[in-house]
Image (cartoon, grey):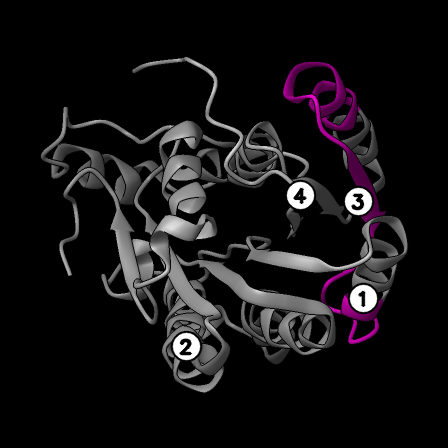
């Protein structure tokens, strides 16, 4: 895959990427910054602070852009306002919101508790809604809302019911928000990664992920963070202005909508 620097197609834009300390979120944040965007990175745990600080330094030195970090718990209803306020104070406005942060569980039906349900849905579905609500008053025209879903939203995997249901809910939001917000040129889309080389993938049972890779037409492998970031970048740029309400499978052909 080519490793040339991307064009500065997002110069002057401001992006928020939730869950940006590692994995897909880190890759998206660096890629958008490399295209010229100023970025806000969110992270939750103290152990992620060092990773986020290192990413900010890398964005400054390699991407030649500016980033700030906000530590918060996206399960808290107050977190979105905290993130947006920090972004507006630092950069003045918002152009792109990437709802990437998510948590995973692989509990079978009878082991799921109400607390499990709340943790998954509050992070994976409610937080994107509250992030959008907090962002809208500061979202400049031709805004871009990009939700990171999963092939799990449409494919059945034993023990992954809560995660899959939360991502299906996010895709429902995507289509509804696209219908509601398109009047001023704002687009809303979702990206559905298949298995991607990341810390989250390492937590998935081999019995679930290995058959997915074997069934992936493109090289029978997991995807890379860069490959997902490229799709997100397209949706963030002006060239995607006629694409909205879509759930785009970035899975090497594992799932075709």
CA–CA distance between discs 2 and 1? Answer: 24 Å
The numbered mark, 1 or 4, whose residue comes first in the sequence reads 4
| Residue located at (56% from left, 40% from top) | 10
Left-right relation of 193 to 216: right
Left-right relation of 194 to 55: left
Q: Please say if the residues under marks 1 and 4 sit with CB atoms less than 8 Å apart.
A: no
Q: Nearer the viewer, mark 3 or mark 1?
A: 1
| Residue located at (44% from left, 68% from top) | 188
Residue 12: mark in rendering = 4
Residue 32: mark in rendering = none
CA–CA distance between discs 3 and 1? Answer: 14 Å
Magenta residues span 54-81
Would you name the residue on which mark 1 appears? Answer: 79
Would you name the residue on which mark 2 appears? Answer: 178
Residue 66 on the magenta span:
yes
Would you name the residue on which mark 3 appears? Answer: 45
Q: Position of residue 162 (x, y in %)?
A: 44, 69
């Amino acid at each position: 895959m080519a490793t040339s620097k991307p064009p500065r197609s997002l110069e002057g834009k401001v992006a928020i990427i939730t869950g940006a300390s590692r994995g897909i979120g880190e890759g998206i944040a660096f890629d958008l910054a490399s295209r010229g965007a100023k970025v806000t990175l969110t992270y939750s745990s103290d152990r992620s602070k060092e990773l986020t600080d290192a990413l900010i330094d890398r964005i400054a030195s390699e991407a030649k852009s500016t980033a700030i970090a906000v530590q918060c718990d996206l399960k808290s209803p107050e977190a979105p306002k905290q993130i947006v306020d920090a972004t507006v104070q630092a950069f003045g406005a918002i152009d792109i919101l990437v709802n990437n942060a998510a948590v995973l569980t692989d509990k079978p039906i009878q082991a799921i508790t109400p607390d499990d349900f709340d943790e998954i849905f509050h992070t994976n579905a409610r937080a994107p809604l509250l992030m959008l609500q907090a962002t809208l008053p500061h979202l400049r025209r031709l805004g871009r809302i990009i939700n990171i879903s999963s092939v799990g939203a449409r494919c059945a995997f034993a023990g992954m019911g809560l995660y899959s249901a939360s991502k299906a809910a996010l895709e429902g939001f995507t289509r509804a928000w696209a219908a509601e917000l398109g009047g001023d040129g704002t687009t809303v889309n979702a990206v559905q990664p298949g298995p991607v080389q990341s810390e989250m993938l390492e937590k998935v049972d081999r019995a679930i992920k290995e058959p997915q890779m074997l069934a992936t037409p493109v090289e029978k492998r997991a995807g890379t963070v860069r490959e997902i970031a490229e799709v997100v970048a397209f949706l963030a740029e002006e060239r995607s202005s006629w694409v909205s309400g879509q759930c785009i499978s970035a899975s090497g052909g594992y799932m075709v909508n």
